[in-house]
Image (spheres, rainbow, N blue to C red):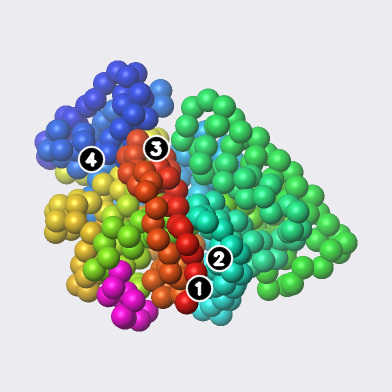
Amino acid sequence: MTEHKDMPKETGLIENFHLLREGYQYIMNRSDKFGTPVFETNLLGETGICLIGKEAAEIFYDNDRFKRKNAAPKLAQKTLFGVGGVQGLDGEQHLNRKVMFMSLMSKESLNEVQAIFAEKWECYSKSWEAEEEIILYHEVKKMLTETAFEWTGVPLQSDELEEWTDTLSDMFEGAAVIGLKHWQARRSRSKAEEWLEALVEKVRAKEIHPNEQRALYQFSFHTNPNGELLDPSIVAVELLNLLRPIVAISVYVDFTALAVYEYPEEAAIVKNGGKEEQQRFIQEVRRFYPFFPFAAARVKKDFEWKGYMFKKDTLTLLDLYGTNHHPEIWEQPEIFAPDRFLSWSGSPFDFIPQGGGEYEIGHRCAGEWMTVDLLRVAVDYLVNHLSYSIPKQYLSYSMNDIPSLPESKMKLADVKRI
């Protein structure tokens, strides 16, 4: 009989404070402390388990061992994901909903969204030439809002751009904070869901006629495993699970600009290279800089791993940032080195900035391909199509803020198209 081991534990309600205070490094710090990839702690008022590393990710994305129902904290459901969204589904319902998302990720569709985003760079950069300086993060959020609406087929009036940019930004900027900003994020999601739900009703009533290849039409007429149309409120949630993540790519774009500035030798390789060099650079941006800290699931049934018992329904967090910086996986993980991806095996469990596992049957982010494609557009413009200076500013970023960003949001001065 296998001898069970006692799982290392961090106890006390104060751990909730530590989780918020330490942000991206909370699980890494405890894993280093205990010398193990698994430990128990208090998570949002209940006993939970934290995991880190490739082996842990392989277990975490095993659908026979973990489930997503009721895993995401309420604060995330009310802001980031929405209630009833694909991230909280399992089994047949999840597969059905995942097919709906993955159907949009064809090569043709991804080429189209890249072209839309490139047009925005061209358009916006013209106006930047008349400005003394611009704040890249704010500009890119607007660019991505326009891109998201055009690509999904959701109508957007020019005088609504600022409002929708703020609304979608609230959902990921205020998801992990306590206080007024969090409640603003909740209000923004509720307002957006109500508007999109009414829009779906108009599509079904044939009062408006969106392009049938766009997400607005496809989601409005998608059926569940029983052959029934999804409830309009669920369609609204899932449309926001397209719109909001696309706008959130602005965080990565900001870090891409920071990397171009901080690592000019690597940026020069991109400038003198092609698609492969761009790909390696942005993959290293996604590995190196903080984006989403961890993923949540619940134990589906009792099982044992490495001598530790995992009890049914236990909340479990997988450290995404920590796995991307794990010294057993990545040589000198603290160094920004795009060429590390020349020898990367392509494992779905060691490089997981947007989750791990398989796309079609697992819970890996359906929009990851799009993220990579849009970041290639961004780095191409930053190194090949624009000249600019970086004025004095605060470029440090906090590992406690979720999402983290350069403090000055990357100011660019004297922007010119080349």
Residue on which disc 3 sits: 401
Residue on which disc 2 sits: 129
Whole-Å distance between the Cαs marked 4 and 1?
Answer: 42 Å
The answer, for residue 406, to whether it is visible in the render is yes
In the rendered structure, which disc, 4 or 1, sits on the residue that comes first in sequence?
4
Whole-Å distance between the Cαs marked 2 and 4?
Answer: 43 Å
Q: Nearer the viewer, mark 2 or mark 3?
A: 2
Up the image or down, 231 lies above or below 48; here it is below
Residue on which disc 1 sits: 417
Residue neighbourhood size for the residue with mark 2, other residues' Cα within 10 Å, grouped as few (<14), some (14–19), many (≥20): some
Q: Nearer the viewer, mark 3 or mark 4?
A: 3
Up the image or down, 341 lies above or below 24; here it is below
The percent position of residue 250, horizontal first and vertical second, equals: 49, 55
Which residues lie in the magenta part?
A: 267-277
Which residue shows up at 76% across the image and 58% down it? Answer: 157
Whole-Å distance between the Cαs marked 1 and 3?
Answer: 33 Å
Up the image or down, 154 lies above or below 69; here it is below
- What's under tag 4, amino acid-wise? Met
